[in-house]
Image: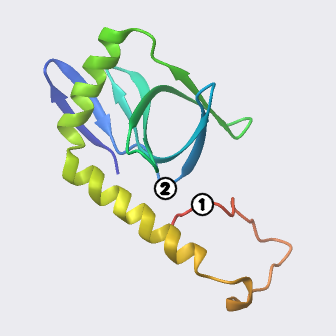
Amino acid sequence: MTEKIELHGHELEFLKNNGKAVIEIDLGDRTDECYLIDIFTVDETDYVALISSETNEIYIFYYEDSFENDEIDLKVVEDEEELEEVFHLFTHYWDDDALDNLVEDYNSDIENFDGFEEDDFEYEVEEDDVIEDSDSLDE
């Protein structure tokens, strides 16, 4: 369920994503595995916030979802003033404690997910079943 707030003259909407995702981003000279924090809107512009699983660095990108191609498109926010303002608004909702709890939750899910062996599960797949992305950490 999304949460709408008004802050510093901006209309914000948080918690637009459903579930969790681990996303690898290409930073040119290296890649970084990140956890999805939130897809959120500031004044009708969609952004996505990711946190590095290794360094806890936060990345904010423009967010576009192409439902037709099952792809998300992340674009760099090149305007430094815009990025600073969006980050400032973001940190009013997502404080350090909330981020720490989210990272702990991801790490716990990954430990539990990695601890399972294929033989630990008995399952049957029927023709009508839809199989989701196996890397998903949704509970």
Q: CA distance from mark 1 to mark 2?
A: 7 Å
State the residue at coordinates (13%, 20%): 8
For the residue carrying disc 1, how many other residues have a C-alpha within 10 Å: few (<14), some (14-19), or many (20+)?
few
Give left or right: position of 40 versus 126: left
Residue extending farthest to the front is 29
For the residue carrying disc 2, how many other residues have a C-alpha within 10 Å: few (<14), some (14-19), or many (20+)?
some
Give left or right: position of 52 versus 68: left
Identify which residue, 67 or 98, lies in the foreground.
98
Q: What kind of residue is marked 2? A: Lys
Q: Which residue is mark 1?
A: 136
Q: How many numbered tags mark residues here?
A: 2
Q: Which label belongs to residue 102? A: none
Residue 73 is at least partly visible in this image: yes
Residue extending farthest to the left is 8
State which tag comes first along the sequence, 1 or 2: 2
Residue 139 is at least partly visible in this image: no
**Relative image position of residue 99 (x, y in whole percent):** 29, 50
Marks 2 and 1: in contact by CB < 8 Å? yes
Q: Which residue is mark 2?
A: 20
**Image position of 133 with respect to 72: above or below:** below
**Image position of 7 with respect to 77: above or below:** below
State the residue at coordinates (50%, 73%): 111
**Relative image position of residue 129 (x, y in whole percent):** 77, 71
Q: What kind of residue is marked 1? A: Ser
State the residue at coordinates (22%, 35%): 91
Identify which residue, 110 or 6, lies in the foreground.
110
Residue 4, by quadrant, is top left
Q: Secondary structure at mark 2?
A: loop
**Image position of 66 with respect to 8: above or below:** below
**Relative image position of residue 52 (x, y in whole percent):** 45, 44
Identify which residue, 138 or 119, lies in the foreground.
119
